Amino acid sequence: MAATKGLGREVYQEAFERLGNISAVAREFGVCHRTVARSLRGKQTDPAIQAGMDAVGTGMVPAMAWIKTKGTKDSPGYSLMLKPAADDADPLERIREAFTDLPAAPLAPPPLYADDDLLTLYPIADAHVGMLAWGEETGEDYDTRKACDRLRSWVGQCVASAPASGTGVILVAGDLLHADDQTSQTPKSRHVLDVDTRHFRTLDMAISALAACIDLAAREARPGDRADPPRQSRSSQQHGCPLCPGGAIS
């Protein structure tokens, strides 16, 4: 931590010019993305908060800090909670920065023929990935794996029956996940939700299912429109797909 004490804009700027992105700079110095971004934008940290950061030897700007002073016979002591202004960086820019160092996924082979005058829309609504239902109580069992399997199956069937359109759109209309966060409660009324284990497991499985759906939609064409069998992806091998040799979605 002591190595980050006293770092200024010049240090971050030199590292940024050398490394090319804010995420890499933050990793090199062991500070958070926001600290580097604020410094490069020329924002000054409040002196009281900076004094506290220097006292503990950190370069990370805290989301909140308590500043306390001792009372004397002439003046009382004070205890203040300081909360720095919210970072006004563009969220999309921060997401773009976070993905800078990740290798791009290989492109799916395009169809040999597609009608540029057609657009196929694949709306996804109310998948409620992460919901847990007990069949004896609700009439049917439901969990994260079943939700993701159905999502892949539905998109696969739609792709198989859709015309070879020049443009495909996957529209996530809402309620893709059953719970918004790890509290497993509705955000406003705080009703407790029945969820299928860990929130980040649900996120990983939902992202994997959507990635498989995107891969399927990118290959949009009937099997007869291809001269060669399409390349099988791992997801289509596991779950079956009419576009793959021997595949079938039930």
Image (cartoon, rainbow, N blue to C red):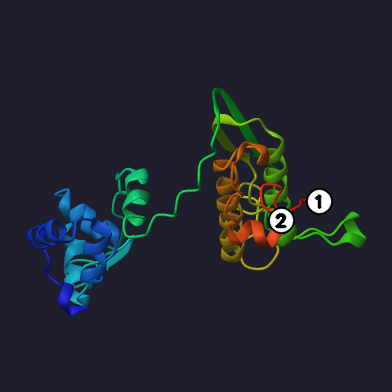
Q: Nearer the viewer, residue 31 or 81?
A: 31
Q: Amino acid at mark 1?
A: Ser
Residue positioned 32% across, 55% down in the render: 100
What residue is shown with label 2? 240
The residue at 34%/49% (across/down) is 96
Q: Residue furthest left?
A: 10
Q: Which residue is mark 1?
A: 250
Name the one closer to the observer, 238 or 62: 238
Q: Which mark is residue 177?
A: none
Residue 104 x, y percent position in the rendering = 39, 55
| Residue 68 visible here | no
The residue sitting at the front extreme is 227
Assign a secondary structure to mark 1.
Answer: loop
Residue 58, percent from left and from top: 22, 72
Label 2–label 1 contact, CB within 8 A: yes
Vertical position of residue 115 compared to residue 2: above or below: above
Residue depicted at 84% across the width and 60% down the height: 141
Mark 2 Cα within 10 Å, few/some/many (few <14, many 20+)? many
222 w.r.t. 79: above or below = above
Quadrant of the frame with the N terminus:
bottom left
Q: Is residue 66 left or right of residue 12?
A: right
Residue at the extreme bottom: 2
> How packed is label 1: few (under 14 Cα within 10 Å), some, or many (20 or more)?
few
**Chain-order first, disc 2 or disc 1:** 2
Quadrant housing residue 121: top right
Q: Position of residue 244 (x, y in %)?
A: 66, 52
